[in-house]
């Protein structure tokens, strides 16, 4: 696999790094907020410019001296990005002018030995304002406006001219995309860090310390897994801050682009109402789902039995009765191989196909055992024809002889029979009804 050149965006808090990151990537991936520290993890994206592919890293604000419990770890993340990158873009605020922290960060970057371009952001008009930043001592100082897209192309031209060119691949991404979702503080970032092997996402006792959806690639056993560690989802009535509202939006977007949802539940706290709400998001997105019961080492030490917990899950999350369940400990690493295997099986189930002939023979046998019933009235309902019309999730269309809907109990019967016949554990199933008009 070709290694892409890496470009890291670094700078003090609130200079527009995430706005520039999103401008280059072409979508709102990092959270934009006016307060320092709204990006606290290293946020990665693979993108391209003029046919040249590269990896872009967004970082939290770099503060060389801070006592803030969140900004400190964010600075640590920025330091790791500096170490990983092939080229550094020092983002500064052209409106605010040259600040002491800019000079201190420039000195830190100079010591890294990496090539540096100064990106003077928030300049919509004259380029003259960028001139004072030449005092930082770097050869390339370029003005731009990330918000309006001005000068971003010139910045990318200059950056990629300093890096080895890797042509944008036409190959389809073969990675299995897994969205880690759950309430704040159930162990999502700990799970990601256990897989990746470093504290890539901030781990803290403060609920919600992961705000962005952070993509992390794991290569294991010749397979590629792309993890999307989403910010913890809170109840809507508790969304007092805009940044938490955007976190919910990002989590739901992550589910939309994932192949499978990993719904994390804290074994020591049991199944909460919010767990059901988040599971509902995965169902709405039509995603295969694995219920991941975390902190099982602690629950086991308390004498809790897996059979009992499974019963609680089936009782509280009836609409996810089809989901696969694994018990893990992100802290110790127990159960992680089983988690990946369950995710692969769930995705494979979601991609299951059946020929039209096989499906109609299945429907005939199902009707022989249990004749169809209408939702309303005493109509003699017959399924005239059926076909599979989609995958991920498996979707089936039925044509009936009357303009009525099937009784919900018969829909459930067909779904259960399909699951048993085709081994569809781990994926939702959709049954659509088409009726003849008289």
Image: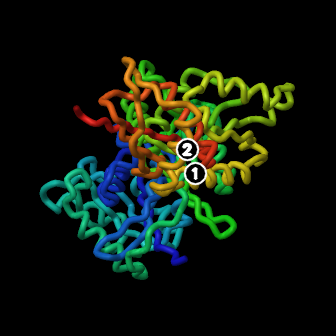
Look at the image and tell me in which quarter the N terminus lies. Answer: bottom right
Q: Residue at image x 23%, y 49%? A: 95
Q: Height in image: 124 above or below 315?
A: below
Q: Position of residue 103 (x, y in %)?
A: 41, 57
Q: Height in image: 163 above or below 349?
A: below
Q: Secondary structure at mark 1?
A: helix
Q: Height in image: 432 above or below 173?
A: above
Front-lying residue, 230 or 80:
230
Circle 1 residues within 10 Å: few <14, some 14–19, many ≥20: many
Residue furthest out toward the bottom? 164
Front-lying residue, 412 or 114:
412
Front-lying residue, 306 or 236:
306
Circle 2 residues within 10 Å: few <14, some 14–19, many ≥20: many
Disc on the earlier residue, 1 or 2: 1
Q: Which residue is mark 2?
A: 427
Task: Classify residue 360 as left or right of residue 321.
Answer: left
Asked where in the image residue 90 lies, by quadrant, the reply is: bottom left
Task: Classify residue 182 as left or right of residue 22.
Answer: right
Q: Which residue is mark 1?
A: 349
Q: Residue at image x 34%, y 59%? A: 25
Cβ–Cβ below 8 Å for labels 1 and 2? yes
Look at the image and tell me in which quarter the C terminus lies. Answer: top left
Q: Residue at image x 34%, y 80%? A: 161
Asked where in the image residue 91 lies, by quadrant, the reply is: bottom left
């Amino acid at each position: 696999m070709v290694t892409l050149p890496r470009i890291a965006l670094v700078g003090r808090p609130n200079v527009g790094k995430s706005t520039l990151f999103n401008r280059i990537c072409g979508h709102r991936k990092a959270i934009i907020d006016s307060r320092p520290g709204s990006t606290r993890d290293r946020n990665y994206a693979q993108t391209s410019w003029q046919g040249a592919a590269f990896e872009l890293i967004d970082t939290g604000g770099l503060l060389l001296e801070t006592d803030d419990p969140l900004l400190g770890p964010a600075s640590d993340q920025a330091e790791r990005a500096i170490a990983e990158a092939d080229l550094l873009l020092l983002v500064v605020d052209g409106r605010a002018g040259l600040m002491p922290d800019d000079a201190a960060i420039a000195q830190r970057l100079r010591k890294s030995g990496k090539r540096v371009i100064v990106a003077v952001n928030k300049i919509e008009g004259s380029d003259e304002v960028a001139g004072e930043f030449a005092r930082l001592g770097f050869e390339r100082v370029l003005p731009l406006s990330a918000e309006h897209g001005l000068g971003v192309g010139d910045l990318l031209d200059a950056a990629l001219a300093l890096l080895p060119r890797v042509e944008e691949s036409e190959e389809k991404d073969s990675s299995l995309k897994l969205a880690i979702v759950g309430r704040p503080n159930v162990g999502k970032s700990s799970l990601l860090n256990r897989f990746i092997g470093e504290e890539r996402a901030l781990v803290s006792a403060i609920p919600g310390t992961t705000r962005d959806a952070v993509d992390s690639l794991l290569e294991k056993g010749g397979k590629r897994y792309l993890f999307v560690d989403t910010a913890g989802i809170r109840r809507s009535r508790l969304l007092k801050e805009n940044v938490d509202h955007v976190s919910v939006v990002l989590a739901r977007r992550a589910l939309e682009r994932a192949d499978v949802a990993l719904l994390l539940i804290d074994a020591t706290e049991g199944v909460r109402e919010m767990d059901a709400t988040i599971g509902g998001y995965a169902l709405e997105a039509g995603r295969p789902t694995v219920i991941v019961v975390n902190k099982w080492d602690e629950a086991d030490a308390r004498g809790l039995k897996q059979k009992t917990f499974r019963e609680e899950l089936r009782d509280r999350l009836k609409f996810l009765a089809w989901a696969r369940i694994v018990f893990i400990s992100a802290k110790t690493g127990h159960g992680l191989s089983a988690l990946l295997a369950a995710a692969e099986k769930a995705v494979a189930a979601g991609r299951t196909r059946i020929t039209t002939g096989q499906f109609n023979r299945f429907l005939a046998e199902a009707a022989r055992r249990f004749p169809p019933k209408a939702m309303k009235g005493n109509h003699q309902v017959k399924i005239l024809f059926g076909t599979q019309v989609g995958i991920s999730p498996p979707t089936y269309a039925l044509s009936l002889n009357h303009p009525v809907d099937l009784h919900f109990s018969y829909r459930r019967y067909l779904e259960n029979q399909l699951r048993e016949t085709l081994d569809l554990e781990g994926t939702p199933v959709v049954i659509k009804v088409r009726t003849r008009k008289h």
